Image (cartoon, grey):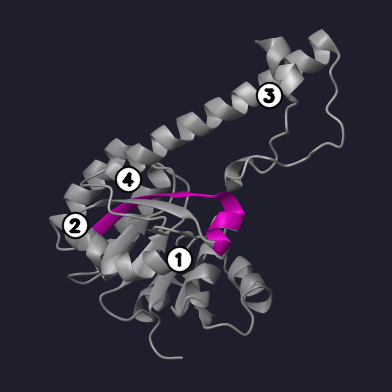
Amino acid sequence: MGKAHFGLIGLGVMGENLVLNAERNGFSSVVYNRTYAKTEEFLLGRGAGKAIVGAATLPEFVAALERPRRILMMVKAGQPVDDLIATLAPMLEEGDLLIDGGNSLYTDTERRVAELESRSFGFIGMGVSGGAKGALEGPSMMPGGTRSAYDAIESMVSLMAAQVEDGPCVTYIGPGGAGHFVKTVHNGIEYGIEQILAEAYDLMYWEYGIKLKNWPPFSLRSPRFVYAPKIPLQALILLN
């Protein structure tokens, strides 16, 4: 394999599935994990026989990518992102692009966009929704940063995203930390719905003795809520 189209750092559950998604959609890839044993395990397992290679060091990883480089970072939010950027930046060249696919604080993303764009690198803060299944089969993605940075990844993320009747579940959200801000709001709504479902079930079970049969019958169609119960109408009326 020649130079890879796409690079991924961080072979957690989401990282593994996103790079498999990219490869399935025609983007040869190189992966790096801070523990090379994890990289080897992936390449001998789920990544076997695919257009994915592993790198034991970050210089090897960067050298394996075609230019301009497109690197997706799937690491813990906060200081680990800053540390990784500080390590990568001296190896990058003008026009290379870093994508933070974690749940970073949007103000951190604002700062990183300004800093890296001033050094002629691109930076995208991108919320990724859909969990492990969505990452593999097609997530919803919320990229923010400069328009030119988004244009550099649009063809790739449009293929990787979930596909619905009116197109892929990805669009340019806006400048700076807009993508991660929208993901923060999205998570707040999601967790609120999950809390309502949990409290409704708790109230029905402990206060009214209503037991949901054939647990769990799936009803809500969002990949994030596939485990939500189908609450009987009479129970909702009782709660109301």
Q: Nearer the viewer, residue 191 or 223?
A: 223
For the residue labelled by badge 4, is the local secondary structure a helix, a strand or a loop?
helix
Disc nearer the start of the sequence (4/1): 1
Disc nearer the start of the sequence (4/2): 2
**Image quarter of residue 232:** top right
Q: Which residue is denoted by mark 1 in the rendering? A: 160
In the rendered structure, which segment of residues is drawn in magenta? 123-137
For the residue labelled by badge 1, is the local secondary structure a helix, a strand or a loop?
helix
Residue 230 sits inside the magenta stretch: no
For the residue labelled by badge 3, is the local secondary structure a helix, a strand or a loop?
helix
**Mark 4 to mark 2 CA distance (whole Å):** 12 Å
Q: Which residue is denoted by mark 3 in the rendering? A: 198
Disc nearer the start of the sequence (3/2): 2
**Residue density around tag 3, few if under 14, some if 14–19, many if 20 or more, within 10 Å:** few
Q: Which residue is denoted by mark 4 in the rendering? A: 179
What residue is rendered at 22% in x and 45% in y? 176
Disc nearer the start of the sequence (2/1): 2
Numbered circles on residues, count: 4
The kind of residue on which mark 4 rests is Gly
**Mark 1 to mark 3 CA distance (whole Å):** 32 Å
Q: Nearer the viewer, residue 2 or 55?
A: 2
